């Protein structure tokens, strides 16, 4: 349990007593998401995105498993099997559109979840491990999504595989052998499709395993909250069920409405029309772009156009693209401020919103043609992105004067929390004599 006053599970019916004594699964569920898990009472709607991310993962696994039953992982039939799913399989069109738009929804939810962590300092001690596991989940998601994009074997699928795997060829010494090992040959082909299909099917279950570790790590220190103040008494918390299960349920309903609008009314709005053309190795698309959720990192990749010393521009772009995510691993130690929440950090809060604008600009530029002035703006936006994490955050955390924090979570919600102060105050020793 996260807090010493969390409630223990006590089964009442004979059947639940019998099950709990032999397989304590009810106890586990009660302690993880039931009334036995106490959470801060002041969580806002940005904390719902963690639950939504898990919901999106379940959608992707369920739709993906059913789609795999009808998909042909061979270059000669991959495109036609995708069309077969759309036209001949019962509800196949809905499964495919649900899976494709579900990936976009998953990334949208995860981006909100990550930037909530940036704003409220969810990466700070004692929650570093939660943050690190979250970054691992994001990297696994990117790999899974890229491999899934290749599977329809349309024009954009083929050339995305050609371009992205070709980036590994820029690595000195091992680049070309690594590229050939990934592709199973010198160019994307049947071996590539088989490998990507296998990994695309396997990695979601790896993600699910890391998510379980992520939630497990969360239950050790407990959830963070918008104030960044740690729990001081039982007046600061409420049971996860029914308070936050109800709140999460309302959010899931709203999410499903938006998700259904895309699936049923504009299923191809986020896709690329070239992917409805069979893959043709002899015809390069006019404008090769990945899915929208890769655009910020694609803009960083393309922002390097000149060699620097012994480093080729291509290699610098690859290194920077990966470094743009890997820098998040070091964020708990780059940000030395004792205050977690940006609500009480006026200077950091300004730079946070500059970062949000910068990432949105990178996202737009990643989908734009690789020409001026987009390349120049990408270079400036990339420069600021790394300056934010490597220079601005450490300096701001050292020189900033935060605003006064509330004494407790309850005080931030209801005003002066005398009960919490009384419980937190050290016992007064009796007077001598």
Image (spheres, rainbow, N blue to C red):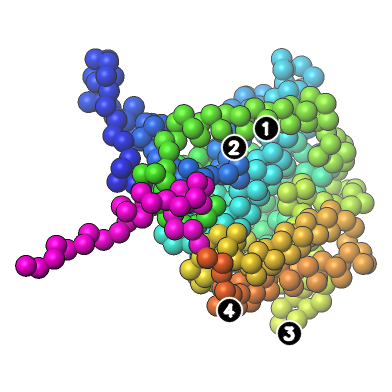
Q: Which residue is mark 3?
A: 309
Q: Which image quadrant is residue 66 in?
A: top right
Q: Secondary structure at mark 1?
A: helix
Relative to 42, residue 55 above or below: above
Q: Nearest the camera: 399 or 54?
A: 399
Mark 3 touching mark 1, by CB under 8 A? Answer: no
The CA distance from mark 2 to mark 1 is 8 Å
Mark 2 touching mark 1, by CB under 8 A? Answer: yes
* Crowdedness near tag 2: few (<14), some (14–19) or many (≥20) residues, C-alpha within 10 Å: many
Q: Which residue is mark 1?
A: 255
Check if residue 167 falls in the magenta segment. Answer: no
Relative image position of residue 105 (x, y in whole percent): 69, 39
The CA distance from mark 4 to mark 2 is 36 Å
Relative to 14, residue 300 above or below: below
Relative image position of residue 304 (x, y in whole percent): 79, 71
Q: Is residue 228 in view?
A: yes
- The dot on residue 10 is none
**Circle nearer the viewer, 3 or 4:** 4
**Circle nearer the viewer, 3 or 2:** 2
- Total labels drawn: 4
Where are the magenta residues, as a range? 405-433
**Circle nearer the viewer, 4 or 2:** 4
Mark 4 touching mark 2, by CB under 8 A? Answer: no
Between discs 3 and 1, the one toward the N terminus: 1
């Amino acid at each position: 349990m996260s807090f010493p006053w969390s409630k223990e599970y006590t089964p009442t019916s004979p059947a639940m007593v019998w099950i709990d004594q032999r397989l304590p699964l009810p106890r586990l569920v009660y302690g993880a998401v039931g009334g036995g898990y106490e959470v801060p009472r002041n969580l806002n709607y940005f904390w719902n995105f963690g639950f939504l991310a898990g919901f999106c993962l379940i959608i992707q696994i369920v739709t993906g498993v059913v789609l795999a039953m009808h998909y042909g992982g061979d270059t000669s039939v991959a495109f036609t099997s995708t069309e077969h799913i759309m036209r001949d399989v019962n509800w196949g069109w809905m499964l495919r559109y649900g899976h494709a738009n579900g990936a976009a929804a998953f990334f949208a939810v995860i981006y909100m979840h990550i930037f909530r962590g940036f704003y409220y300092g969810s990466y700070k001690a004692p929650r570093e491990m939660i943050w690190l596991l979250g970054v691992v989940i994001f990297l696994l998601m990117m790999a899974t999504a890229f491999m899934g994009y290749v599977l329809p074997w349309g024009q954009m699928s083929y050339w995305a595989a050609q371009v992205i795997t070709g980036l590994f060829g820029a690595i000195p010494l091992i680049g070309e052998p690594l590229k050939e090992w990934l592709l199973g040959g010198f160019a994307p082909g049947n071996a590539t499709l088989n490998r990507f299909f296998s990994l695309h099917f396997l990695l979601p279950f790896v993600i699910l395993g890391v998510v379980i570790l992520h939630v497990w790590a969360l239950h050790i220190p407990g959830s963070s909250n918008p104030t960044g103040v740690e729990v001081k008494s039982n007046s600061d918390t409420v049971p996860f069920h029914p308070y936050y299960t109800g709140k999460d349920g309302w959010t899931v309903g709203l999410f499903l409405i938006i998700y259904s609008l895309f699936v049923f009314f504009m299923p191809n709005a986020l896709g690329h029309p070239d992917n409805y053309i069979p893959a043709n190795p002899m015809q390069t698309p006019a404008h090769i772009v990945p899915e929208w959720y890769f655009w910020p990192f694609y803009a960083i990749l393309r922002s390097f156009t000149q060699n620097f010393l012994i480093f080729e521009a291509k290699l610098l772009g690859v290194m920077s693209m990966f470094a743009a995510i890997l820098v998040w691993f070091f964020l708990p130690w780059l940000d030395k401020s004792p205050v977690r929440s940006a609500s009480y950090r006026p200077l950091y809060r300004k730079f946070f919103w500059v970062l949000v604008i910068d990432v949105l600009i990178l996202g737009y530029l990643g989908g734009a043609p690789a020409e001026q002035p987009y390349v120049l703006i990408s270079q400036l936006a990339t420069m600021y992105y790394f300056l934010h994490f490597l220079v601005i955050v450490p300096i701001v955390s050292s020189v900033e004067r935060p605003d006064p924090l509330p004494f407790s979570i309850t005080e931030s919600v209801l005003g002066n929390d005398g009960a919490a102060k009384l419980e937190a105050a050290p016992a007064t020793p009796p007077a001598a004599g």
